[in-house]
């Protein structure tokens, strides 16, 4: 899709320019000095909007990386990644309403369970306004809206890629840009400081999902993309090795880092060759068990309190297991149930428990069905996608999905909980939705290629 070409684009540009002029005139009479300073950024903002109108795929690349280099943290962790994704969603909806006057979505089985999850989330947000516990207050409306925004923007990221990345070149650019940034982050965050340069803070902290997709995409392209020059494949292999060195030796206690990334490698190898998988899975399981034993022994208190927390969560969830208690609310209900003698607020540290608590089992079913459909799509594309980058991407996405499923059991990495990883976590979590959306984009390309071949 080429958005806003022709008449629709010509209509929107004057509107944007006139609106900017009116805003400047108004601020000149009414605004403070600080607000007037912000006016200087308006031309840049308008230019950015026009660029994203013309090249929405470029906007997705910028949105996926900007949060790691722009140190902006607004209220409650509100960040530039959320701003850019919301902007891209607004522009996409505006394009469909002005240019197409309809909302055509990619004909993929992954879309409908995701839309169903969005509908359930909206209903659960309304349900969350009901007084479920007499002696507890609701989460502030801002926290509830923040939790809902995480779901909407995550699903929106998936749909944006699925519907707007229609060319394999853009999908390739998106992937290579992310991997190139991974190399840059290592140089800036780890290599340059060894030479006495204070560059560590130039790159914002990354969560588990970042490492999952860095490993999944780098390993799949290195191992399976035979179109790549051997030197590049070797370089990608080096990126994977260094990432594991970082996760194992420098962050070993953070099991949410190395374990899901290890699962990525095992999944990609197993999906590629079931024979190799049969050999590798037991070896990886033993290795993971051995490694986890050391982590568990050092974090025994953390593990035991999680089980205590889940038993309390079960008591809270049974109040409304169908649609949940709304976003962020359960955090305010937990002090009613003492954990080890303390009346404190806590979160579940588990994405699936969070989903049930906030959107009920209906929401969880929709979410799991969505993951299943994405996995099934990746399974089909591993054979249908053209050899080279596209096929390696399909395998990488399957491995990344496997890693995300495991990471969701260890924390709220897929859909950050407002009172734990929070809004700031969307900078990292959106990467999973971005690359999984690429599977749908790839599906549409393969379908169009088949139709074109059939016509000939």
Image (spheres, rainbow, N blue to C red):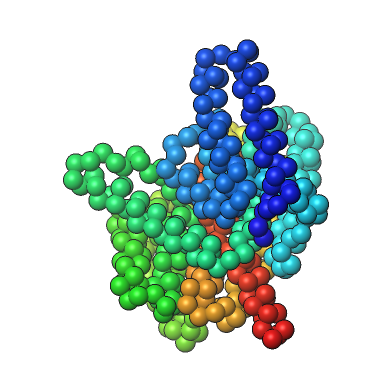
Please tell me in which quadrant of the rendered image residue 361 appears.
bottom right
Q: How many marks?
A: 0
Q: Quick check: 407 above or below 374?
A: above
Q: Would you say 229 lies left or right of 120 here?
A: left
Residue 188: x %, y % from top left: 30, 47
Give the quarter of the figure containing the C terminus.
Answer: bottom right
Residue at image location 35% in from the left, 60% down from the top: 243
Q: Position of residue 140 (x, y in %)?
A: 67, 30
Whether residue 409 is visible here, answered yes or no, is no
Q: Which sits in the foreground, 312 or 291?
A: 291
Query: Viewed as shown, does residue 381 lie left or right of 286?
Result: right
The residue shown at (26%, 39%) is 198
Residue 207 vs 21, above or below: the answer is below
Furthest-left residue in view? Answer: 195
Position of 313 with respect to 218 (left or right) is right
Q: Give how far across and how far down residue 176 sits, in percent.
A: 44, 62
Above or below for 55 versus 387: above
Tell me which residue sits at (54%, 79%) in the image.
386
Q: Return the x and y of residue 134 as percentages of the image width and height.
A: 76, 31
State the image quarter where residue 216 is shown. Answer: bottom left
State the residue in front, 303 or 91.
Answer: 91
Q: Residue at x 56, y 39 (%)?
A: 47
Q: Is any part of residue 16 visible from this angle?
A: yes
Q: Quadrant of the N terminus?
A: bottom right
């Amino acid at each position: 899709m080429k958005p806003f070409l022709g008449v629709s684009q010509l209509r929107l540009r004057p509107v944007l320019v006139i609106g900017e002029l009116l805003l400047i005139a108004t601020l000149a009479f009414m605004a403070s000095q600080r607000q007037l300073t912000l006016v200087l950024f308006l031309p840049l903002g308008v230019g950015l909007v026009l660029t994203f109108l013309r090249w929405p795929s470029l906007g997705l690349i910028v949105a996926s990386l900007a949060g790691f280099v722009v140190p902006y943290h607004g209220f409650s962790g509100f960040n530039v990644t959320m701003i850019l994704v919301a902007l891209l969603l607004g522009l996409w909806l505006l394009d469909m309403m002005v240019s197409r006057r309809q909302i055509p979505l990619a004909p993929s089985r992954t879309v409908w369970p995701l839309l169903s999850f969005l509908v359930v989330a909206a209903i659960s947000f309304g349900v969350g306004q009901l007084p479920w516990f007499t002696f507890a207050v609701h989460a502030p409306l801002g926290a509830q809206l923040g939790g809902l925004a995480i779901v909407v923007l995550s699903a929106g990221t998936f749909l944006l890629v699925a519907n707007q990345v229609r060319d394999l070149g853009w999908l390739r650019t998106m992937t290579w840009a992310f991997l190139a940034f991974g190399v840059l982050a290592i140089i800036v965050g780890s290599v340059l400081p060894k030479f006495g340069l204070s560059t560590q803070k130039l790159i914002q902290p990354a969560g588990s999902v970042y490492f999952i997709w860095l490993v999944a995409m780098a390993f799949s392209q290195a191992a399976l993309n035979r179109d790549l020059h051997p030197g590049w494949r070797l370089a990608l292999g080096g990126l994977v090795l260094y990432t594991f060195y970082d996760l194992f030796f420098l962050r070993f206690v953070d099991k949410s880092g190395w374990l899901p990334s290890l699962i990525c490698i095992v999944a990609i190898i197993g999906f590629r060759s079931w024979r190799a998988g049969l050999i590798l899975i037991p070896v990886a399981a033993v290795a993971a068990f051995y490694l986890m034993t050391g982590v568990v022994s050092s974090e025994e208190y953390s593990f035991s309190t999680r089980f205590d927390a889940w038993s309390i969560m079960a008591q809270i969830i049974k109040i409304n297991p169908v649609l949940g208690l709304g976003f962020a609310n359960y955090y305010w209900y937990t002090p009613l149930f003492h954990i080890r003698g303390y009346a404190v607020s806590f979160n579940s540290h588990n994405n699936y428990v969070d989903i049930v608590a906030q959107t009920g089992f209906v929401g969880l079913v929709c979410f799991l069905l969505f993951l299943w459909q994405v996995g099934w799509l990746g399974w089909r594309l591993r054979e249908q996608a053209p050899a080279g980058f596209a096929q390696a991407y399909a395998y990488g996405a399957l491995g990344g999905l496997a890693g995300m499923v495991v990471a969701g059991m260890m924390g709220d990495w897929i859909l950050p909980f407002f009172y734990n990883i929070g809004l700031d976590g969307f900078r990292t979590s959106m990467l999973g939705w971005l690359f999984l959306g690429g599977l749908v984009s790839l599906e549409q390309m393969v379908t169009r290629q088949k139709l074109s071949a059939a016509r000939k």
